[in-house]
Image: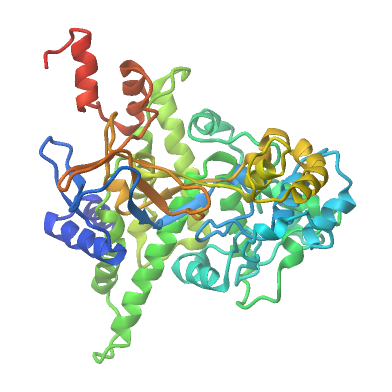
Amino acid sequence: MAEKDLRSQVEALLRPVEPAVAQAYFEQVIQDLGVPLSIRETSDSKGRGVFCNKAFEADALVIKEPPLVGAQHAANKADALVCSRCFTMIGSLEQQMAHRLLSMESPGINPDYLRGLWLGAATLPCSDKFPLPKLVTCLGGCTYNIYCSSACAKVDWASCHSLLCSGPPPQPDDPVKEQSSSSDGPIKDQSSSSEAADHAGTSGHRMSFGDFSHAREAQKAPGLASLVPAMKIAPPAMGKAEAVRAFNGHADGTNDIFHLAAQLIAGVLLRADRIIQGISASGEAREASPQDHWAALQEAWRPFAVACKALWWDCMAVPADAADEENFRGSVRQLASDSLELLREFLYDERFPALFDLELYGSIIGMFELNNLSMHVDSPVETYAILATKESLCCAFDPTEQYMAWLVSKPLLDALGDSYAAGCEGSCFYALQSCMNHSCDPNTHAYKRAGVDTDGSAIILAKRAIEAGEEICISYIEESEPHHVRQSMLEDYAFTCSCSRCRADLASTGKIKV
């Protein structure tokens, strides 16, 4: 494709969609979710907002929404076994504990006992009160993604993972494995982008997921690899598998947000391809033209065309310790360019070159930066630990059960230390939640109810009584902070808040009149 035509397509994909098109999309999303909400323009120049069509009482559920794309943080994978599709905790209480302790270099627990917990040969008292879905492996045989059910595995495969799967882990005599240094694959030298990685989300953790998996295999300890069944799908070619591992290694070592971008692009590719296949299978009996490819891409892109976007390297607030703004933004841009180069190696589709343009890639990541929601799912290990302690007043266990649970689990919990309470942590992008505007005095909040909300869905609860017709607002930041701190924290979202609380704060200092 000529450069002029490519630029034209990229500009078209990034151009704000017509209001009627956006409205039709959101009305369909609202209908599918069955929630009493609507999307319309606000009256205070904030743009689009979410409004309630009925009154809500305090603490009422306003919306439960599954993510369009989402990913568990790489640093968190050694802490929690969760479904890669819905983020439900999986395995068993024993496997969750063993998984976490096996990731620690010196947990102080007999490794044979940990292996027994992993395999189910050893059990914890009353663990049957915390049933979890059994672990289901990826259809393609990789251990990077695991699931709570065959249904989730199939949905994830069809929606994006079929293009992102690296196949079975390399065997010890596989030369590819010898090149691996992190998370399933080799990582390019990141020295030129180290400053960007430091400020753009690099996670410090005790051991990378890839190093953890490889170390566990080397110790002959059972783990994810031991649960991989016969592949249901033919593995990718060696070159693609290595390229996928390289991309995953780069994302795990720099910024998890690249995983979200890869999921989005893979999903758009698969949806566009299905549209094109429909054309080829239609009564017209013709091959799809470049015009058909472009139309299919636009249709497949629609869920993200309606979202607010900005170039990642332009919308990031410059850290106070950054030596030079221009160099910082340049290094962030280079980080994205490196990621895109790795993604192109195995995902590029010549029918849709605009999807692999750096400006579009940077805008996708910027969209996540501006709109994504931190995702948390509680661990049953935390609940078990609370119930097992002698100080617990909960009657879920009888006294004998509680004593035995405390006696057996205490060494494990002591070895885990403060990390015993670690749940699933990640980032997700949601169609409706991403339209909710910020307020420093919000009427709703994202809050998971213990024992009720056990997956990665966005849960928005009313903080107070809400009248019909009110705009639904959440806080993007910690709203208990003073005005100047809140405004500083909101710089990452590229706007200055002028909500009623901020105006009142300024009025109290005499800076504005109310």
Residue 226's quadrant in the figure? bottom right
Q: Is residue 170 visible?
A: no
Quarter the N terminus occupies: bottom left
Q: Is residue 164 above or below residue 322?
A: below
Tell me if 346 is positioned left or right of 406 in this view: left
Q: Which residue shows up at 27% across the image and 62% down it?
A: 29
Q: Is residue 503 above or below residue 382?
A: above
Tell me if 404 is positioned left or right of 29 in this view: right
From the top left corner, tell me how far across and down residue 243 is, in percent: 59, 57
From the top left corner, tell me how far across and down residue 377 is, in percent: 53, 48
The colour scheme of the drawn protein is rainbow
From the top left corner, tell me how far across and down residue 92 is, in percent: 69, 59
Q: Which residue shows up at 48% across the image and 39% down it?
A: 335
From the top left corner, tell me how far across and down residue 245 is, in percent: 62, 55
Q: Is residue 149 visible?
A: yes
Of all residues shown, which one is farthest toward the top? 510
Q: Is residue 320 above or below residue 211?
A: above
Q: Nearer the viewer, residue 404 or 412?
A: 404
How many labels, in total? 0
